[in-house]
Image (cartoon, grey):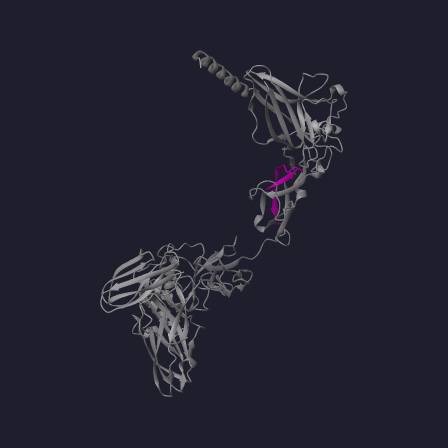
Amino acid sequence: MNPLLRILLMGWLLAVVSSSEMVGQCPVIQSCPAAQLTICDYSTNDSMLWHDDPFTWSPVLLSSDIYESAANLSIMFGDTCGGMPEVSYTVFFDLEQDNLNETVISSNMDFPPGKMLYGNAFSPGYLEGDTMTFDSRNLPDSMRYNFALEVEAIGNSYVAVLRWNTLTSPFQYAQARLPEGRHHIVWKVVSGGVTKTCEYNFRVRDCLEPEAYCLPPSTINIQYDQIAELPLSLVRDYGMDNISPDDELSYSMRRAGTGGSGYPLDSFGISIVKLPFACSDTGSHIVEMWVQDLHGNAGFCQTTVTVTDTSGYCFVLPNACARAAFGTMDTLESIVFEITAGDSMPLYSSTLQPLDGGCAEVNLSTIPAGATYVLVKPYKSDTPLNGVSTFDLVLISKHILDVELFSNPWQYVAADINYSNTVTTFDIAQIRKLILGLVDTLPQNVTWRFISADCVLPPLPLPLPCVNSVAFNFPPTIYPDFNFLGIKLGDVNGSALINSLSADATPRSKARLVVPNLSADAGQFLDVPFYLDAPGDRLGLQLALDFNPELFEITGLSAPNLPDFDGTCWAQNGDGRLAISWSVPLPHALLPDAPAFTVHLRARKATNLSEAVQLDVQRLNPETYAANGDLQDLELTFGEAYKDLSVKPQPNPGAGGAQWPLRLNQPGKVQLQLVDARGQIRYQQNETLSAGAHWLTMPHDPSLAPGLYSWRIQSADGIWTGQWVKI
């Protein structure tokens, strides 16, 4: 091709492309809302606009007079090609509030003043429908409104606005007042054969809060039921709204500052027309009176109400109450409250009348004349074993030996049962006597110590700095608080039951106490071993055994495998009851092939052991304590005990960790390994152990997936291997 011709052709192509790009930019819509517009109406409804039955309808107001709001619906556009683009709008109205845009008006339509077509949205060209009146003002037609379009040039851009005008003044535009509802508008701009559109939804809604007017401050009085009710009629004056009729407004109320926002409703979604006030509410209160219109807008005013008790219904005798110091808010039951009145010598002493729930009524009407002071003091002496077990002895021993000190001040008071202002082994010995049944009371013949509830115990509370009573001058000008904190003596872990409704909710596992079912002839002596089938080191145990005295005579008890076990750790109560309480401050390994203790018997008749012995659970709960402090209930089982110790994991299969019993003949290093199916070591433990009994513990590992694992234990005594299943 000729080079000159090629250049001319390329220039022509560039001109065509450039011209096409410019045409593509003609016109340019510069602002188009991306989301629905909300047009808020804050004006009073004009009943002469948009009121044409049956074409207009408000289901909220139940009226054909739908409210309207001034609206500025507009669009900004430009034209890079020069000239004035053509712009128009089409509005799709929902005049019946049924979510159906059935009526269309366009800037290109020409109707008589105040008129438009209804229901024309589904006809070709929107030309078929019923003629309706949107402007029915009592004016000449030339002064009624028409839909119009106002276009104004601003620099190189144009702004088109949906307006109203009249035939009298066609170029004097007024803000269009559009009806309530959800509507849609389509703007169309045409230039150079190119059409651009902008369309969006808009909603016209009532946003104005109704006005609320309250009555002046009022006073209400407590009634015989100790309640004063404030009716809405003492608070509400009136309300008014721009749209909703006065008789369609809703009213409610709430106390100011009591939480909640917006129009108050009760739990059933109903307006609140009464507010209750109790004796504790005597005095002045600010009350909010709310008014809500039919469209959900709400406003409020405030007034003051004063609650009085002129009849004295609120005066009640004060109560004396006590709760446990170890955290629970429940009230202690079965407390005796002593009241003493006098001066240097007591003039009067009595006990307070108990009430349901554990408190007592402080009635001073019986106090004799001449008394100058009154003292109220709680006292409780029943159920000394409540909350007391051998586990408390474990904790006290740990504290005395500095293994694990008490963490709460009240524990010092609970452990000092002999009132020596110290915690010693004498307290342990006294508590163990109570557990074994050698004594049935505590020193001072009380089971709880009480202090005033407003006293804060210091970290080291012995000697006790708090008073155990409440004293006041008589007659009182105002009653003091008769509240106390109780500390159960001997119970350092806070397990005492507070009242008849409380119960020990601590979950417990089971441990077996295995004994062979031996048989004996009359006169035969038996040594009966009791084995503890529970993996892991032990801190102690307690139990009571009942032997039928007609079948067996108890001649003794021995426990060489329990350290520190001596004659103070067991007692024979009566002819056939045997109680055991053993505890140590540091965990001790007790393997299942070695008896925990052995009971020595003489048979009085030919019998089997299973027919003559059982656990006594009435006074002493049979239980044992793991190294981590977990409590396990003991169950008596007759069967074969372990004759030879097997080094194998317990439990197997297991969902948590596992433990291996191990008895070493010589001290040395011990290694435990757990290996998965791929040969990877998932757990390894290395420690140096003394000769004797041990438990090797693998803690629970949540990352250990269920499956089959191999284990290996190596020591100076040998190597043991096996498999363990994680479930």
Furthest toward the front, the residue is 1
494 up-or-down from 613: above or below: above
> Which residue is more in the foreground, 49 or 362?
49
**In the displayed structure, does residue 570 sit left or right of residue 616?**
left
> Which residue is more in the foreground, 181 or 546?
181
Residue 138 among those drawn in magenta? no
161 up-or-down from 449: above or below: above
**In the displayed structure, does residue 633 sit left or right of residue 65?**
left
Residue 655 screen position, x and y as percent: 40, 60
**In the displayed structure, does residue 315 sit left or right of residue 631?**
right
**In the displayed structure, does residue 449 sit left or right of residue 291?**
left
Q: Quadrant of the N terminus?
A: top left
Residue 517 screen position, x and y as percent: 39, 79
Residue 288 among those drawn in magenta? yes
451 up-or-down from 623: above or below: above
- Whether residue 636 is visible to the viewer of this picture, yes or no, is yes
Q: Quadrant of residue 126?
A: top right
Q: Quadrant of residue 154?
A: top right
Residue 198 screen position, x and y as percent: 59, 26
Residue 317 screen position, x and y as percent: 56, 57
> Which residue is more in the foreground, 339 or 60?
60
Which residues are the magenta region?
A: 286-309
Total residue callouts: 0
- Whether residue 427 is visible to the viewer of this picture, yes or no, is no
Q: Quadrant of residue 73?
A: top right
415 up-or-down from 245: above or below: below
Q: Label the magenta part by its dominant secondary structure.
A: strand
Q: Quadrant of the C terminus?
A: bottom left
Furthest toward the top, the residue is 4
